[in-house]
Image: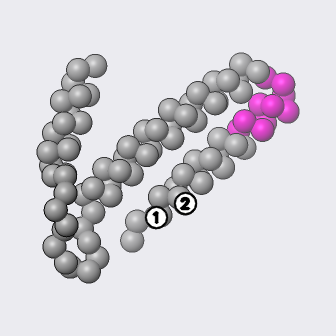
Amino acid sequence: MPRQRQQILDNLDAVYREAYDRAEQATDARLMADLDAAYQREQLLLEVLLDIRDALAVPQTGAPRAAGPDPVGTLETIRRITRLR
């Protein structure tokens, strides 16, 4: 069973909070700013990955998926967007 979304985000927060607190104790303002930017970037990327995971998840009950966005089409869109970089 996959970990809950909030648990994953809380773990990310704990890792960055610990590093940020160490940088703050060392009064390293540049590292604090870098950590803040990295945290925001990682959180955004992680949320996108979790959204993809949720979109591709098969219901545990064995019931058919509710009508909604096509996960394969969504992945194709993501692939096209990343090629634009």
Percent across and percent down for residue 19 are 71, 38
Residue visible at 76% across and 21% down in the picture: 29
Contact? badges 2 and 1 (CB < 8 Å): yes
Q: Is residue 68 above or below residue 61?
A: above
Chief secondary structure of the magenta portion:
helix
Question: Residue 50: x percent and y percent?
Answer: 39, 51
Q: What amino acid does circle 2 point to?
A: Gln
Q: Is residue 21 left or right of residue 42?
A: right
Residue 2 located within the stretch drawn in magenta: no
* Location of residue 39 in the rendering, given as x and y in whole percent from the top left corner: 58, 35
Q: Which mark is residue 76?
A: none
SS state under label 2: helix
Q: Look at the image and say whether residue 24 sits in the magenta stretch.
A: yes
Residue beneath the point at 54% across and 52% down:
9
* Residue neighbourhood size for the residue with mark 1, other residues' Cα within 10 Å, grouped as few (<14), some (14–19), many (≥20): few
Check disc 1 and report the residue beneath it: 3
Mark 2: few/some/many CA within 10 Å (<14, 14-19, 20+): few
Q: Is residue 63 above or below residue 11?
A: below
Residue 6 lies, with reference to residue 33, above or below; the image says: below
Q: Which residue is mark 2?
A: 7
Q: Quadrant of residue 63?
A: bottom left
14 relative to 58 in the view: left or right: right
Residue found 58% across the figure and 48% down from its top: 12
Q: Which residues are magenta?
A: 19-28
Helix, strand or loop at disc 1? loop
